[in-house]
Structures are given as C-alpha cells and as structure tokens.
Amino acid sequence: MTKQEASSSAGPRRRKRLGIARTREPVKERSSSLWRAMYVDLEGAPRQTGRFRTKGEARLASQRAVDELNRGGNDPAWSPSVVDFLEDWNRRFPRHPRTEETNRERLERYILPHLAMRGHEPLGEVRRRDLLEVQDQLLRMRLSKTTIDGAFSALSALFRDALELEYVETNPAQRLKVRPSDPRLQPTRAAKARRAVAPAEIRAFIEHVRPGYRAACWTPLLTSARPAELFAMRRQDIDRDRQSIFVAETLTRYGTTMEGLKQTHHIASREKRGRWMLFPAVLQEMLAERPSHVSGLLFLSPRGKPWSIRNFYRDIWDPARKEAGVDFTLYDLRHTFSSRLLAAGIPLVEVAAWMGHSLRAGGAEVDNTTSRVYAHATGEWRETALRELTALVTGGSVAPKSSRSASPT
C-alpha cells in the first residue's frame, strides 16, 4: 500500500491544533458589497467575525479577534453584555442606516429598560423566560402587537448575529411574538384595518383633491406603489410604450432619498434593487398637465421639494378626505390595486410581481417547489390589468377576463 493510499483509507484528515490564531484576508460578498472579516482560530478552523463596509474595517476586526484568542480569551462561557454588544453591533454587522436606527430605537425604548439588569447582563445569560417577562410588561403597558413584535424582531436579529460569533448557543428571542388571542393584548390605539376601497368612494375623494395633486393620489391605485415609493418616482424611469415605470428608490417620512425599496436596501445592483410597476397611459396624461422638474421627481411639494409623507397627508390628503366624508389611506389604495386585479381573474403570480411580493400562502412563504422556484410572471395579463385600472379612473367597462395580450411585462 502506498503512502497516498494509506492516507485516503485513514478517513478525513483532522486539523492540527496550531495553538496560535491568525488573520485571513477579508472576503467581499457580491450581493451586499460588504467585507467579511475572516480569521483562523486556535483549532485551525476558518471563522468569520462580522461584515463591514470597508476592507480596512474588516482587517481590523480580524486582528482584534485574533489578538483576543492569542491572549487566552477563548473561554466559551464568556460573552459581552447586551449593551456592550449593541454598541458594537452595527460596526460588525452593518445594515442599511435606517434599519440600524430602527433596531437601536426599538431595543433602547422597549427591551433594555425592562431587563433585570437593564441590558448589562451577559448575552449568554439571557433566557427565554426573561424575555417573556419583558413581553408581559409591554403588554401591561397596553402597547400594540405590532410594536411589541417589532421590538423582539430587532432583539432576535441581535442574538442571531451574536450566535454567528459564538457568543450564545441559542437565540432566545427567535419567533417570539404576541399571540393574537392573548387576553392581555388591549392596545390603547386600535390597529388600522386595511381594505379595498370602492371606486365610487375614490372618485368622490378625488373631486375634493386640490388641482395639480390628483395624479399623486391616483398613483398608488394604478401602480401599487407604497407611499415611500410614490414620492421617489422619476419621470425618466417611465416606459411610455409599455406603460410601466421602474422604481429603485424610496423616500423616508421626512423626504430623504434612500436607495432600494422596502426589503432591497442592501442590494448593490440598481437593476436588482428596484422593480417594474404598471403605469397606465391615463396616468401619464394626468402628469402631462404638470411641468417637469429638474430633479426628475414626479410629485413635489408646492415649494418644489420632495414630499415628506406626513406633510402630504396634512396639506393634500386629509383636507380632501374630510371634505369628501371618506376614510382611507394611500396604503389602502395599494390594497385596492391587488384586490381589483385578482377579482378580474388575473393570476396571483402576475399581481405579486407588480407589487414586489414573493408568493405566499396562509401568511407563510410558499414551500412548494413549483410555486416557489418555477412560477414566474409571464406578462401575458398586462393589457388586461391596464384596462381594469383605466376603468377605475374613467368609470368605463372592462374587457372580458379571457381577453389577454401576450406583450412582455
């Protein structure tokens, strides 16, 4: 038997304990353009110690991890406190600035004040029962389910990253949500119920909207745009022939531009970050009445600046809503978009693509390979959808459900 044959028959080769940790060059992720800080531990196994925006930051993080190991700081029972890890969290696992701000606000406002040591307990000592006690306190404060679940979602993300760094063995906040039937759930503010708005109600509202701003009010219904996407739409992204618009930006509630849509802020490629929406010709005709602006934005405030969502409601939406005696929101019109198209017989996969959704069933991701992997929007229903949406504006009749066009999306 040769030496090579003896080696192969002996089974997988075990790593030799080196006793000295060493750094490795950072690795760049294609999807997020972040740098993974890499090192080799005392057992000779490659490890990751976070993701960073620059290669230099990743190298420093690798060096700190290696120095800690070589000083003997490899006690598996040791972990930083919740507060300490929170201070270093965004540096080691960067996210979109808006997400980082939201996570920190939720944790500091709803979680840390109610922990036994106000967040100064080690991560490894936080148990599920401790978090259930925090949940109980928040419920007795009569906060809404959405608020409480959002706070624990941020905490779960923190523990998930701590688990990756081996500071904890389990994520005690994973899927920790308030049960809808919980008798302690008595929020001081009732949850806003979304609905599909009747066409007659929409037209009555539009009649009271100030001239020049009616196109902005029609757009969520005709395109499925979220409010943050609505005020980031640009004239140069309209494809007039295909009656579509490409949107790859959002505006915060204060009117600041951000790259990416609701769940695509982390994607580097603009083409993958945005999505195509329907943009019917009737909406293009409304916009033709307004002069274009140097910024390219379709909907601007009277001062020629990007709208903040709250100011649009205050100055344009709410006065018309009160005069018309109706009660619905921009987001209700997005719900109306999907409801009307589904009622017209347009397949779910087509409507989901225009809205920027993945296929879902019963509130959960579809785990059927045919639906999850092989089902794609074909675009054959686009003309039918455009006719249905145009009829909402004009009040005209809609072509039969079987009438379809094979034009691309």
Image: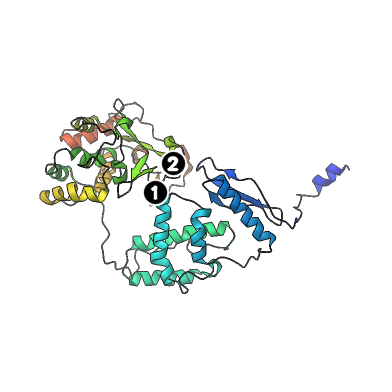
Q: Is residue 383 visible?
A: yes
Contact between labelled residues 2 and 1, with CB atoms less than 8 Å apart: yes
What SS does tag 2 mark?
A: helix
Most extreme residue toward the right is 1
Q: Is residue 297 above or below residue 315?
A: above
Relative image position of residue 183 (x, y in whole percent): 33, 70
Q: Amino acid at mark 1?
A: Ala
Q: Gap in Å between the C-alphas at discs 1 and 2?
A: 10 Å
**Observer-nearest residue: 47 or 147?**
47
What SS does tag 1 mark?
A: strand
Relative image position of residue 382 (x, y in whole percent): 31, 31
**Observer-nearest residue: 132 or 199?**
132
- When asked about the image quadrant of residue 270, the answer is top left
Quadrant for the N terminus in the image: top right
Residue at the image point whose x is 27% and y is 31% from the top: 384
Q: Which residue is mark 1?
A: 361
